[in-house]
Image (cartoon, helix red, strand yellow):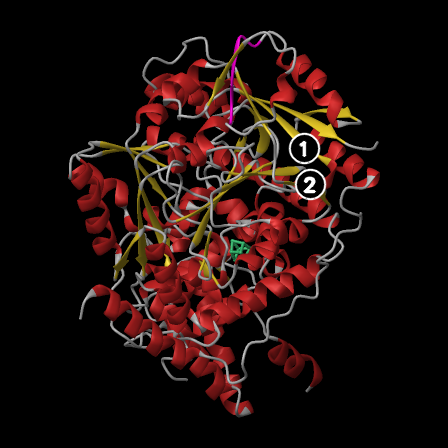
Amino acid sequence: MTAVELGMPTVASDPHGHLRGTESFPRAAHRALADTQLRRNLGHATRTIRAKRAAVVGEVDDWEELRRAGESLKADTMARLPELLVQLEEQVTGRGGTVHWARDAEEANRIVVDLVRGTGADEVVKVKSMATQETGLNEALEAAGVAAFETDLAELIVQLSHDRPSHFLVPAIHRNRAEIREIFLREMPGVDPSLTDEPRRLAMAARAHLRRKFLTARVGISGVNFAVAETGTLSVVESEGNGRMCLTLPDTLITVMGVEKVVPTWRDLEVFLQLLPRSSTGERMNPYTSTWTGVTPGDGPQTFHLVLLDNGRSNVLASPDGRQALHCIRCSACLNVCPVYERTGGHAYGSIYPGPIGAVLSPQLTGISGPDDVNASLPYASSLCGACFDACPVRIDIPHLLVQQRAAAVAAHTRPTGQDLTMQAAAIAMTTPGRFKLAEKALGLGRVLAGRKGRITGLPWPMSGWTNARDLPAPPAETFRQWWERTHS
Amino acid sequence: MNAREEVLARLRTARDAGNPATPVVVTRDFATTGRLDPGSAAVLERLDETLTDYKATVHRVASEAEIAGAVVGVLGEARSIVVPAGLPGDWLRGYAGQVRTDGPPLAVDELDAVDAVVTGAAVAIADTGTFVLASAASDQGRRAITLVPDHHVCVIRAADVVCSVPEAIARLDPSSPLTFVSGPSATSDIELDRVEGVHGPRRLDVVLVGPG
Ligand code: SF4
């Protein structure tokens, strides 16, 4: 297979930002699995959302047709991506906005920091955006002396607790109401000490905490859900009204979007505004969706900047199959149905893109540098059960991409891994019965390694690649062939 | 190469390398007209249900003449309200509180000081319990006036009610800002349950005008 087929980088793109953790998935997952509170919280939250999603998807007679439309619209977008971006740029510029292009996370951050500095503001309000989490914008702003206030409730919880997001939609999905109450009591200045853990009271506390900030903010920073090339219209889909606050009240708005967020026409929103809310929060429609086009005199920010971010996306686009990962509308449905995600949570994936889609997107964005690259372990974070494909509103064939990325991970190795060698050995052994018999003898050695637990938990290299990800059951004392020979000869 | 040229060059190379052998055909086999006729009693009934389901309070009136009674009723004790410059004067007949018209535009703190806002709507979607505010429409106004006050009263006429999302999108002009509203502000961020009342208006009343 060629590099292109495997979604490996074909053009120089050196993505930066939070796309890679510091340890492999199996290691991180081992720790997460031991955290019973985390598993309870995730189990409860994902069960709730799965039931809600199923109910509202069931109401829509033409759901499958909508999914197919979403899939084909995204495929069409990828086939015309550069042209659509140029069209978007023309439209936004024509309507009084300014468009910036960023090769990678650092460049995007530099652009935003300079723009904020140019306004003289020393704080900004932010509506949750995966793109700016990916680039690590908050850290860059902080380093430049600008305080960034996350305003989405879950994002606020993450920020106040100095934590990391673990889900697209609800970055604090790993926290339950009692933990959220404690975080607020500890970290929120001026919070009412009699705060209970009733969700409504917690939401009110967030409202009180952010109200002044919204009403006085001079600069807002947002991401985007859909950007319409035809009209230059951008849209943000949200619930709380914090998005509306950030998009409407400041004088200056800076929006950062991954290049894949563009859609060809306004009409295409008839598909995506049906698919997204039902798949993501399990609602017929989310409370608020805002759309705006450039600058509107007398309404909202009078200065508007749009930053278009590559940061590895061109790597992904080069793969005929792998580019499907760019179709993702970040609804989180595949996370919520994934048996692996439900048990490990989002942090185990390292990258800010967790779950099944993260497992195929992150390694493609970063490329895999070699056997020690932690992102090489992500495509193995799946049992290939297929639930993610069934849930995906734009029909991304995640199981297929997982298999393909496993192949890419193997191909990226400069020296063969244990699994490669094992597979090669198996291929050789299975070609002749004599060799197969010899191989079976070697299995006896496995029983020695397994010891009394009956599990092999760690093999020396080259076999370690395998046992890093799973315990190996000890081989049987006698194989089928050995048993047959003993009893039938 | 500057960033723009470089990103576009990368994307062109990658796009060509990854393009499928056969051109993409966009399919739109889903329903583009709704199950219920626009403006019909049935579509209003469904809108009433879906709005109510997401915690808006719906007040049904049969004719234009009854709008004022319903609006004034839901405003109740509100001492002051803001309205967009083009709101029909009739709708507030009998309201005793202070009416501030947003033209010239009020400052944010002034908006924060009023008790409620009254507007019309551009279109409403029965399938989803949504109405859309168009900033260019004189009875809806700029976005801030429906955002800062804590209570929103929205008047929706039967002629503006459609069944499905595609019908609504077809009626809307995106060149000025639009806000799709489905219930009062809410969050699903605590254990993924929906709770109402965060940053947007916490109270939402809809006066629905038409047969039913
Ligand atoms: S891959 Fe599909 S299901 Fe998963 S978040 Fe993206 S759009 Fe949703």
Q: Position of residue A228 (x, y in %)?
A: 46, 57
Distance Cα–Cα, label 2 vs label 1: 7 Å
Q: Nearer the viewer, residue A335 or A317?
A: A317
Indicate the secondary structure of the residue bearing disc 1: strand
Parent chain of label 2: B
Q: Name the residue located 49 percent from the left edge and 64 percent from the top edge.
A: A264
**Are dots 2 and 1 in contact, CB under 8 Å?**
yes
What type is the residue that disc 1 sits on?
A: Ile
Q: Which mark is residue B160?
A: 2
Q: Is residue A468 above or below residue A116?
A: below
Q: Can the viewer see residue A456?
A: no
Q: Is residue B76 magenta?
A: no
Which residue in the structure is indicated by mark 1? Answer: B156
Q: Quadrant of the C terminus of chain A?
A: bottom right
Q: Is residue B79 magenta?
A: yes
Q: Can the viewer see residue B102?
A: yes
Res B205 quadrant in image: top right
Indicate the secondary structure of the residue bearing disc 2: helix
What type is the residue that disc 2 sits on?
A: Asp
Q: Is mark 2 within 8 Å of ligand 1?
A: no
Mark 1 Cα-neighbour bin, 10 Å: few <14, some 14–19, many ≥20: many
Q: Position of residue A313 (x, y in %)?
A: 36, 65
Q: Is residue B48 above or below residue A345?
A: above
The part of the chain drawn in magenta is: B78-84
